Image (cartoon, grey):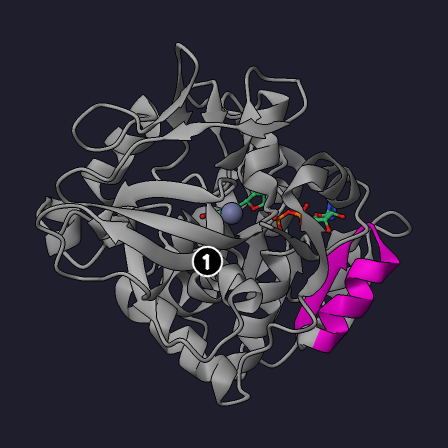
Amino acid sequence: MKAAVLYEPKSRFVVEDVEVQEPKHGEVMVRMVAGGVCHSDLHVVKGDMVAPLPAILGHEGAGIVERVGEGVTNVRKGDHVIPLWRLSCGQCEWCLGGRPALCDAAAQIRSTGCLLDGTSRFRKGSTEIKHFAGVSTFASLSVMMEQAVVKIRNDIPLEKAALVGCGVITGVGAVVNAAQVRPGASVAVFGTGGVGLNVIQGAALVGAGKIIAVDLLDNKLECAREMGATHEINASQTDPVANIKELTGGQGVDYAFEVIGLPETISQSVEVLRKRGVAVIVGVTRREATIALETFPMVFQERTVMGSIYGSARPRVDVPALIDLYMAGKLKLDPLLTRTYPLEQINEAYDALERGETARSVVTFS
Ligand code: PAD
Ligand code: ZN
């Protein structure tokens, strides 16, 4: 099978033939149809986020079950599925407590680059190739745990459905599950890429009032308006903090979302809060990053700062529900999918993401 392998940080993807082994007990083999080009993989490429390498990256995607290992009961050959980059074991404290995105087994998979039995299903000659986040969606045939796939209806095009597996659930979930934005509330969103646009879409879905989009690029801000932003600020031309204060009568916003992953914009998202405001950090920074927090407003204005991983969602329930919303015409996926690339052009797809030319693109497999 063909896959995009990253051998070391700060290098390019190598698209090559990789040997894939049969799914073992509790595992499924998925024929990937589309793999989403999300910024989180780019953090690994740049060495800002550490993952066991060499690995087949990719964590957003959609495909069709090709084969199932022994004991698999949730899905069967031919099912359309979305891989979950945080699987939920269903047994740990976090899964049982309704927080499957924090599953302990998912953390183990991520840190080892292996499936739950501690081994990998990918090889290139004598070299073991690791799994990324347990899903490795940049592979024409990938193997993952049964708990890492969710079956979806088969009447949605899989390139569109792929986006739900990370960008959509992360962005919409940050609004609905993490912040629990109230109708009429004011919202600022720093960074309107593939994930930030879905924060905007989530805010529009729950009936937020002002939805203020902040980015450095006009093309992203145009897309933000299409997704439901009511105001746009180009932070390369003007101070976003002063501008947001001005747009809110000097008060600031009820909710601010940072969807870039930079300490300075995280600080800005806290600075723009009004009394009882909530800042949600979604963007992934370099591992060692810190921010300084002005403590007085935290206390005297009762501010909250929180993080959100995987939309603080329950993906097995939320993924099919989001797809139903799209099919009912209530969730936007079409304007998000800017481009489709063959897997062979994955490096070009990431170059275009870095230059800010695409909102979300997917790679497809011939
Ligand atoms: P993206 O590259 O599509 O979007 C980032 C956007 O930020 C772009 O539109 C940039 O122009 C804009 N930007 C960059 N610098 C600034 C700045 N100083 N001020 C304003 N705007 C700026 O990335 P993405 O949407 O795929 O991912 C965004 C982040 O979210 C990234 O750090 C990714 O790793 C993280 C992420 N987190 C989760 C999670 O569960 N928390 C899931 C998926 C992605
Ligand atoms: Zn992602």
Report the front residue among 129 and 189: 129
Apparent side of residue 63 relative to residue 216 in the rendered image (left or right): left
Does residue 315 show up? no
Residue at 33% of width from left, 60% of height from top? 313
Q: Is residue 223 found inside the magenta-colored segment of the image?
A: yes
298 versus 126 height, above or below: below
Report the front residue among 330 and 264: 330
Apparent side of residue 124 relative to residue 66 in the rendered image (left or right): right
The residue type indicated by label 1 comes to: Ala
Residue at 59% of width from left, 46% of height from top? 38
Report the front residue among 104 and 67: 67
Numbered marks: total: 1
Q: Is residue 365 found inside the magenta-colored segment of the image?
A: no
Residue at 53% of width from left, 61% of height from top? 163
Residue at 27% of width from left, 69% of height from top? 317
159 versus 325 height, above or below: above
The secondary structure type at the circle numbered 1 is strand
Which x, y percent locates residue 65? 33, 57
Which x, y percent locates residue 297? 51, 49
Apparent side of residue 24 relative to residue 18 in the rendered image (left or right): left
- Magenta span: 211-226
Does residue 242 show up? yes
| Residue wearing tag 1 | 62
